[in-house]
């Protein structure tokens, strides 16, 4: 109880505290991202430093280790895999940001380098989960509260899922405060679900969840970090999280979902980032199929809404509302 | 499970659906509130219709009745007292809005008329809770998970609390989307706490909570209504909720807290509205004590932040962050 509260508050405090110095440092290093094709009328954002996501990384890392007990109830402890997926995903994004911003090479990592890094993380984590007796190849089906054994297909399906979620998170990060707000809400929802699973074994479809409390600490440290970061990232943003931050949050989110054996809940809780990916895919295929027509004025879909005349804060508010509604439904499916 | 999901979605859908017609109707009736002394530089808001809170009222009333089972587990059913406190509190605010906007009498209800209405509701509800065997004079102490028997003092203390919370809610309603956002988050937190109490008797300090599921349905219908309403109330607002809406939300919130015997959690979950009240009281007494000095540039404190140069959306974002953090701590105190 006190460790969970501590993780939430410590993580927020760290992000808030190092924010100003980090932003000043990033500016000094000329870490301002060059804005090309990032969206309508964002030219004025030139000069806002990226890699602000590092303040969330510090908050999550320190608070989930400090508030993590050496031996929690003697049960299984998923903190290392959770941190590993989040921070290795971040490493890929960081490399990209670093090359773009410090080396001033506009192209960053090549698409193949990015994908290769993500595939390594995703395959390793999927195999780890498959072999771990506390996770295995059975995933939970929410609402009807049963399980589905994917067998050996667990590994390729979850590899693709991990890559898809990390990139969805990355694609949604295009407006001031957007991904930070969505992930603050989604991480809070995951924390609530962890608490429910940890205290209501009956709800967990007849199985106990070792490590659900550890996962709650991790999810709360993510929520706290996002809320602290939003202090500097809300409109008008003083810093962007960069690929560093978006891949950290995407990696952390998919790791939580898989450790809890609830990847299907991502469809609800992480709906809006998934929508960002799907809108890009739809736009691309429709364009190819029709030889030049577009479904959306611009993709990802949040830029479509911008072109339609909605302000950044209106779009963030809309995404926050959708994420809250769908996260509540996910929570109801577990504990309602 | 499906009734809870239904309450959330139906309530939001009703608020969204009747919004445009209600706003047009209110405008037609010249329901634009005259803006006097409401805050810095809000003159341009002249003409925005008040009483938009009626769309939340419709959502909450219909969805909490439709999604409410005739007999829920055969246990105690608190739906009538919950609705009564919310809607009778609303009636006082509605009378005030109606006189101001339709009768064009700028003074509205006299302070004594308002207080008299609130006292009647508050005393009646406190006595009802005191006499109800499912509530009684014992309140829960979060974190240490014990109880505190207030005895006969329960009635005056809870009467004052009810009046205080309804007025706090009313005082916070001064910026586009502010109270709606805060109450969307706080109602979601109450819903989660209800689910935890309903499914984890062990966490409920050794006592069962009859009606926690009914209260969850009510809290979810409040959350859904707020999110639907925010579609029209977020910056730049197309309608204000008015005293109608703010007293409805304040009444509904205090009713949930008292039915669950968790009034102490209001300090966390409803911290920012309470802060609004406290800032007004501090400002007034400091002014009297020092014969003319002020603590805040303007009270309630959200106008102080406005005068400091924060935009409306920045203040809403800050209040949302604070409410999320404190609501998570409240949830942890019950189910963590």
Image (cartoon, coloured by chain):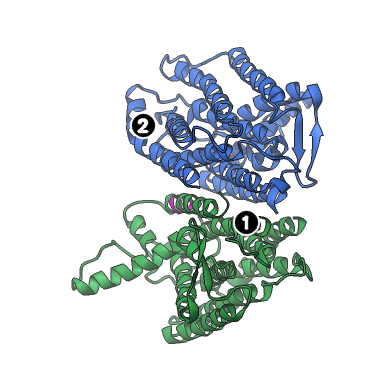
Chain colours: A blue, B green
Label 1 resides on the chain identified as: B
Q: Is residue A21 left or right of residue B326?
A: left
Q: In which quarter of the image is the N terminus of chain B?
A: bottom right
Residue position for label 1: B202
Count of numbered marks? 2
Query: Residue at image x 63%, y 48%?
Result: A199
Residue A148 location, x and y as percent? 81, 34
Residue B281 location, x and y as percent? 33, 71
| Residue B163 magenta-highlighted | no
Residue A257 location, x and y as percent? 65, 35
Residue position for label 2: A23
Span colored in magenta: B316-320
Q: Which of marks 1 and 2 is in front?
A: 1
Q: Is residue B215 visible?
A: yes
Residue A203: assigned label: none
State whether residue B22 is above or below residue A332: below
Q: Is residue B20 visible?
A: no
State whether residue B285 is above or below residue A336: below
Query: Residue at image x 70%, y 72%?
Result: B77
In the rendered structure, are the residues bearing label 1 and label 2 in contact, judged by CB atoms less than 8 Å apart? no
Q: Magenta residues: mostly which secondary structure? A: helix
Residue A162 lies in quadrant: top right
Q: Is mark 2 on a helix, strand or loop?
A: helix
Residue B137 location, x and y as percent? 53, 75
């Amino acid at each position: 109880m006190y460790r969970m509260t501590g993780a939430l508050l410590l993580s927020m405090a760290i992000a808030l505290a190092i924010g100003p110095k980090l932003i000043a440092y990033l500016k000094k290093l000329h870490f301002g991202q060059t804005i090309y094709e990032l969206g309508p009328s964002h030219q004025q954002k030139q000069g806002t430093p990226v890699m602000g996501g590092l303040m969330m990384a510090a908050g999550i890392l320190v608070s989930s280790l400090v508030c993590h007990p050496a031996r929690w109830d003697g049960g299984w402890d998923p903190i290392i895999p959770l941190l590993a997926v989040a921070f290795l995903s971040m490493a890929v994004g960081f490399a990209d940001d670093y090359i773009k911003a410090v080396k001033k090479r506009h192209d960053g990592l090549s698409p193949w380098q990015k994908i290769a890094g993500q595939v390594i993380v995703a395959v390793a984590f999927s195999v780890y989960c498959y072999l771990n007796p506390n996770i295995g190849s059975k995933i939970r089906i929410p609402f009807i509260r049963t399980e589905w054994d994917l067998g050996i297909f667990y590994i390729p399906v979850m590899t693709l899922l991990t890559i898809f979620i990390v990139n969805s998170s990355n694609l949604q990060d295009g407006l001031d405060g957007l991904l930070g707000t969505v992930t603050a809400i989604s991480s809070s929802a995951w924390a609530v679900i962890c608490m429910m699973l940890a205290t209501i074994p009956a709800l967990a479809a007849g199985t106990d969840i070792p490590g659900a409390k550890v996962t709650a600490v991790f999810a709360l440290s993510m929520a706290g970090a996002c809320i602290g970061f939003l202090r500097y990232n809300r409109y008008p943003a003083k810093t962007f999280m960069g690929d560093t931050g978006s891949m950290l949050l995407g990696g952390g989110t998919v790791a939580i979902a898989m450790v809890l054996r609830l990847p299907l809940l991502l469809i609800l809780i992480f709906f809006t980032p998934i929508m960002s990916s799907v809108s890009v895919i739809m736009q691309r295929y429709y364009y190819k199929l029709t030889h030049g027509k577009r479904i959306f004025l611009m993709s990802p879909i949040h830029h479509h809404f911008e072109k339609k005349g909605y302000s950044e804060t209106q779009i963030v508010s809309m995404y926050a509302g959708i994420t809250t509604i769908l996260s509540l439904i996910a929570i109801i499916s577990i504990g309602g």
